Image (cartoon, rainbow, N blue to C red):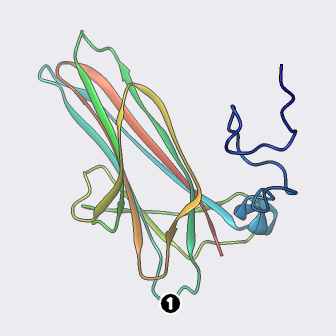
């Protein structure tokens, strides 16, 4: 058995995430550690919707939009999008679902959401404006689209999606049943600001 070096390299038989700062200079702390939860830099919003669908089934949507005001002086760094679709009392129906993340987009009859800080008891507030709707998003440019099965979903971005001042991020989760059933959808978005 050959002796492989302890320093991970991309040409090794097993490629792993960089953990050695000596040979991989970028393998130190993730960028979000610079604005950790202790500084009040992490925020989240969540929304949900459910409905009892009739004999012909139907669709249940939940949408959220986070807008960065043009004069905010801050950038939103998207950390995670997660949520779920929940089906109960379904009579052998077919389920389809999808989560879509978009740049921009417009919500129909939006309700205001207040972003929560991850530093409990802190007076830190987000500069972002957040809204939710039980309708699909109109307009915008999708950059992520994933099919869903009943149950949870989790999308990790670790700050790789940026929302600069004057831009907005929208996320829609929908589920659809072909016959009678109770269907729920939920979404949560986590970000930090710097």
Above or below 129: residue 22? above
Residue holding disc 1: 71
Frontmost residue, 5 versus 113: 5
Frontmost residue, 55 versus 104: 104
Residue 140 drawn at (x, y percent): 27, 65
Residue 7 drawn at (x, y percent): 84, 44
* 57 relative to 147 in the view: left or right: left
Q: In which image quadrant can residue 104 be found?
A: bottom left
Above or below 104: residue 174? above
Residue 110 drawn at (x, y percent): 32, 62
* 105 relative to 22 in the view: left or right: left
Residue 143 drawn at (x, y percent): 36, 57
| Residue at x 22%, y 61% (from the top left corner) | 138
Residue 70 visible in the picture:
yes
Q: Residue furthest left?
A: 56
| Residue at x 25%, y 51% (from the top left corner) | 135
Frontmost residue, 114 versus 13: 13
């Amino acid at each position: 058995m050959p002796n492989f070096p302890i320093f991970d390299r991309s040409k090794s038989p097993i490629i792993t995430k960089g953990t050695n700062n000596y040979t991989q200079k970028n393998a130190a702390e993730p960028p979000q550690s610079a604005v950790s939860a202790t500084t009040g830099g992490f925020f989240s919003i969540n929304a949900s919707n459910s409905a009892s669908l009739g004999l012909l089934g139907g669709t249940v949507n939940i949408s959220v939009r986070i807008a960065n005001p043009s004069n905010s002086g801050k950038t939103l760094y998207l950390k995670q999008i997660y949520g779920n679709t929940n089906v109960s009392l379904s009579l052998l129906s077919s389920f389809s679902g999808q989560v879509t993340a978009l740049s921009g987009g417009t919500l129909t009859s939006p309700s205001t959401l207040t972003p929560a800080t991850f530093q409990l008891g802190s007076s830190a507030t987000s500069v972002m404006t957040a809204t939710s709707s039980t309708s699909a998003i109109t307009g915008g440019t999708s950059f992520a689209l994933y099919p869903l099965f009943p149950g949870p979903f989790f999308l990790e971005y670790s700050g790789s999606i940026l929302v600069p001042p004057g831009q907005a991020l929208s996320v829609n989760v929908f589920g659809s049943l072909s016959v009678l059933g109770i269907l729920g959808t939920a979404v949560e978005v986590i970000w930090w600001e710097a």
